[in-house]
Amino acid sequence: MKIHIGSDHAGLEFKSKIVKHLEKAGHQVVDHGPHQFDALDDYPTFCIPAAQATAADPASFGIVLGGSGNGEQMAANKVAGVRAALVWSIETAKLAREHNNANVISIGGRMHDEQFCLQLVDTFLATPFTNDERHVRRIGQISKFEKEGKL
């Protein structure tokens, strides 16, 4: 599976651990940066390209991370075709996929320990979308608004 990843300075160290974890599991990871620590970098610079690459390849997934994951999720969700979910529990990681068919996960690297964050990533990637009619309908409404600006 191809996975695009981007962070900010707060997520830099943890991003490299996620990349290694995913590559060890056989995934192809594209790292959109940053590649070196800069306390003044801006997460949109790295998270938006990761989200754009995910949207351009519907078979791929994206991961954005920072200190809390909030801003990174907001940035990713500005990209047409992206449904980024901020996850903080195994249940929210599952529901992001099952109910929302999220294609990007956002994690707050300062909110959890490393092992738990890796569990969130693995859960998200392993959980399929249910394709239930109600979820398909709701995602369709979001997509329509994204394209037309109206429901």
Image (cartoon, rainbow, N blue to C red):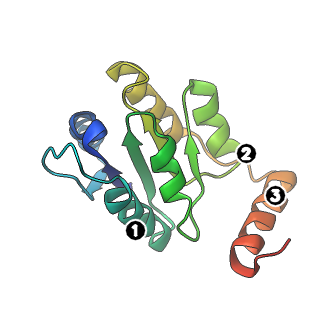
In the image, residue 8 above or below residue 149: above
Query: Where's residue 120, x and y in %?
Result: 47, 30
Q: What residue type is labelled 1?
A: Ala
Tell me if residue 15 can be seen.
no
Name which of mark 3 and mark 2 comes first in the sequence: 2
Query: Where's residue 133, x and y in %?
Result: 86, 56
> Which residue is identified by label 3?
138
Q: In this view, does 92 lie to the left or right of 99?
A: left
Please tell me which residue is depicted at 75% across the width and 64% down the height of the picture. 142
Write down the quadrant of residue 138 in the picture: bottom right
In the image, residue 92 above or below residue 19: above
Tell me if residue 96 can be seen.
yes
Is the residue under label 2 in contact with that under label 3 (CB below 8 Å)? Answer: no
Q: Quadrant of the N terminus?
A: bottom left
Q: In this view, does 96 lie to the left or right of 22?
A: right
Please tell me which residue is depicted at 60% across the width and 51% down the height of the picture. 102
Q: In this view, does 9 lie to the left or right of 101?
A: left
Please tell me which residue is depicted at 64% across the width and 27% down the height of the picture. 91
Query: Where's residue 69, x and y in %?
Result: 46, 39
Name which of mark 3 and mark 1 comes first in the sequence: 1
Q: Which amino acid does label 2 sit on?
A: His
In the image, residue 14 above or below residue 147: above
> Which residue is identified by label 2?
99
Q: Distance between the residues labelled 3 and 1?
A: 24 Å
Name which of mark 1 and mark 2 comes first in the sequence: 1
> Which residue is identified by label 1?
53
